[in-house]
Structures are given as C-alpha cells and as structure tokens.
Image (spheres, rainbow, N blue to C red):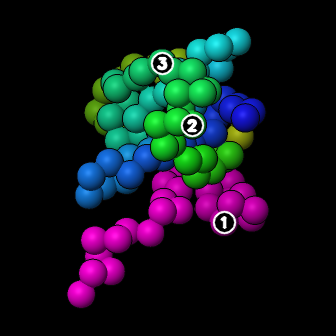
Amino acid sequence: MDILTGEIYGKQSGSRFVMYNVLKVSKNVITLQNIDNPLSLFETTPVKLQSAGYVRISQTPYINTASTGKKRKSIRKPSRCPYTLDFLEDRADSQRPAPIVPDLFSQAS
C-alpha cells in the first residue's frame, strides 16, 4: 500500500465521517492531521492505518483558505493554486472532498 504526502484518508467515526491529511511519510511512520482540527496530529504505520479501517478519499490535498484570524506563517506552502480545479477529482484543492462512504443515518426512513 503506497501512501503519499498530500493524500486524504477518512474513517467513519460513530455518526460522522472524519478526514485526515497525510502530512509526512517516512520509512515506517505516517503523520496524519485532522482536516477539521489542524492541531490534532498523530502518527501511525501503513499496516495500522489499513487495519483500523481508514479509506483513501482523495489524492489531491485539501488546503483550507478560510482565514482563522491568526497571522502565523504556514509551514507548508501549496505547490499549486488552491483554486485550481482538478477535473479527475472534480474539486479544487480549497474544496473539501466528499466522503466516499454513504451516510447511513440520513438514509434511514
């Protein structure tokens, strides 16, 4: 299983779907960042990632362009404009990827 920096992985957690950016990939360790909470980072291995039920959502990175009010310099600079539309993924980098797991709770009627 090849995991690359910038990919987005997701996992169904209770009633919500949580997505994570792959920040760093080293020989045996992968660093993930929660898209909704950028301060939430954790490290895992490719084997644990797959066995825990994480699914690759997108190979196009997600870049949050909403201002947070803080004037910190970002550590990672995007390699392309976040508004560039990726026709293969059908979204721009600044748009959140759509979860590929259907929301089972909204379909129950």
Residue 43 tag number: 3
State yes or no: residue 100 in magenta: yes
Q: Is residue 66 something that shows in the picture?
A: no
Position above or below: 97 against 24: below
Q: Quadrant of residue 3?
A: top right
Position above or below: 75 against 20: above
Give the residue at mark 1. Answer: 90
**Is disc 2 placed on a helix, strand or loop?**
helix
Please give left or right for residue 5 compared with residue 12 in the image.
right
Residue at 35 percent across and 71 percent down: it is 104
Bounds of the magenta segment: 84-109
Please give left or right for residue 59 compared with residue 10 in the image.
right
Q: Which amino acid type is shown beneath numbered disc 3?
A: Glu
Q: CA distance from mark 2 to mark 1?
A: 25 Å
Name which of mark 2 and mark 1 comes first in the sequence.
2
Residue at 42 percent across and 40 percent down: it is 35
**Discs 2, 1 touching: Cβ within 8 Å:** no
